[in-house]
């Protein structure tokens, strides 16, 4: 399922969704938290991205593992497999930071909603969740960079 799409390695295609959706989730969730006047405009987009971003990272991670198996089967060598292992480690961490960001975003969306149970929450809950979203958003973006850079280094180092 995660191996190829129309004859191409799926990983090379699906990583682009994660590279776009995770930083976009981070920016919109942080914007939602720190700009209350914009919440009406950002809420639905943040909610949709809170679902899409972790899913795209998961699919990218799984397709990367399939590609790693292909590289091992074709004996690409210890050096490239070591680089892929580093890349894979960053991807694993990216997945969990993205899940954390998505959950924190969903909780922030709920805490600031008009739901009767949300109205019963203390006022500091929204502030704490906003702080958590900021921290997790920054970490997720850092790991998008680290994962992407390590993957690009593994593929393109020495090519140009």
Image (cartoon, rainbow, N blue to C red):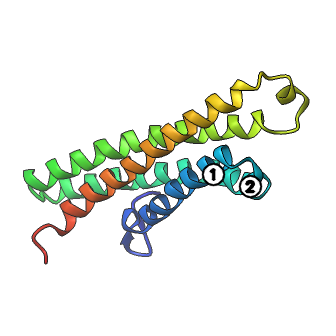
Residue 110, compared with residue 50, is above or below; it is above
Outermost bottom residue: 160
Within 10 Å of the Cα at label 2, are there few (<14), some (14-19), or many (20+) other Cα atoms? few
Question: Quick one: label 1 or label 2, which is nearer the N terminus?
Answer: 1
Helix or strand or loop: what does disc 1 sit on?
Answer: helix
Q: Residue at x 44, y 75 (%)?
A: 6
State the residue in front, 67 or 35: 35
Residue assigned mark 2: 38
Residue 53's x, y, as percent?
55, 52
Q: Choose top left, top right, bottom left or bottom right for residue 8.
A: bottom left
Drawn side of residue 17 relative to residue 127, left or right: left
Q: Position of residue 127 (x, y in %)?
A: 66, 31
The quadrant in which residue 27 appears is bottom right
Give the residue pinned by disc 1.
31
Q: Percent x, y for residue 89?
A: 29, 41
Please tell me whether residue 153 is drawn above or below residue 133 in the rendered image.
below
């Amino acid at each position: 399922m995660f191996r190829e799409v129309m004859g191409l390695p799926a990983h090379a295609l699906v990583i682009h969704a994660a590279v776009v959706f995770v930083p976009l989730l981070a920016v919109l969730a942080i914007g939602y938290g720190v700009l209350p006047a914009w919440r009406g405009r950002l809420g639905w987009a943040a909610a949709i991205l809170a679902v899409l971003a972790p899913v795209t990272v998961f699919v990218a991670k799984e397709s990367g593992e399939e590609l790693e198996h292909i590289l091992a089967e074709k004996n690409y060598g210890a050096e490239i497999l070591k680089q892929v292992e580093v890349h894979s480690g960053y991807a694993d961490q990216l997945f969990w930071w993205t899940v954390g960001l998505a959950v924190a975003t969903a909780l922030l969306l709920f805490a600031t909603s008009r739901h009767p149970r949300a109205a019963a929450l203390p006022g500091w809950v929204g502030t704490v969740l906003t702080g958590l979203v900021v921290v997790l958003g920054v970490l997720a973006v850092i790991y998008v960079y680290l994962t992407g850079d390590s993957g690009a280094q593994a593929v393109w180092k020495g090519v140009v």
